[in-house]
Amino acid sequence: MLVIVGFTLLFLEFFVFPGVNVVGIAGFLCVGAAIYIAYARVGALAGHLTLVGIAVGGFVVTWYALRAKTWKRLQLEASVDSTVEGVDPLIREGDTGVCVGRLAPTGKIRVGEIVVEAQSQGGYVAANSEVVVLKVYKNKVIVKLKTE
């Protein structure tokens, strides 16, 4: 029973709680206790058989885990092919717009009929304030108050 508990704890250490180390140490202690009990209570022959069985079992489990097919069944095969929706190319530096809501420091602005995500250069900007586009990035624009 200690061997099964030990191998289960070692499995959990490697696959569920990597880096915790407490579970792995407990697994090694269980396996070590199983070997000790086999030698101390049952005899040398049982101890040798337990030790060889654990070594062979550990080798088989390690060999099976390191095969490529084992990990192919567990790995995620989906790929991300989407992109960030960019800012409309009609928006240029120097354009003026109106804040749809407040910019604290980010929010939405309307430039003509186009609504885009914007970030204020100077911090908080009240709703319905006129702003000037300073810089256009792929996913947002940098703006400042028109009065500045």
Image (cartoon, rainbow, N blue to C red):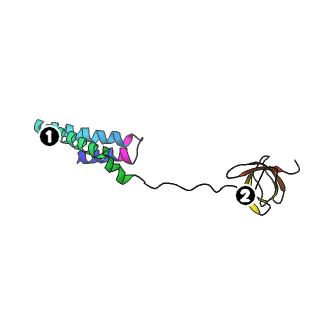
Of 97 and 53, the residue lying toward us: 97
Which picture quadrant has residue 51?
top left
Mark 2 is surrounded, within 10 Å at the Cα level, by few (under 14), some (14 to 19) or many (20 or more) other residues, namely many
| Whole-percent x, y for residue 30 in the image | 27, 42
Give the residue displayed 14% in from the left and 40% down from the top: 49
Magenta stretch holds residue 40: no
Question: What's the amino acid at mark 1?
Answer: Leu
Q: Name the residue under label 1.
A: 49
> CB atoms at circles 1 and 2 under 8 Å apart?
no
Give the residue displayed 86% in from the left and 51% down from the top: 146
Give the residue displayed 56% in from the left and 56% down from the top: 82
Element carrying mark 1: helix
| Whole-percent x, y for residue 22 in the image | 38, 41
Please state the extent of the stretch shown in magenta in the rendering. 12-22
Q: Residue 74 carries which label?
A: none
Of 111 and 89, the residue lying toward us: 89
Magenta stretch holds residue 14: yes
Q: Name the residue under label 2.
A: 116
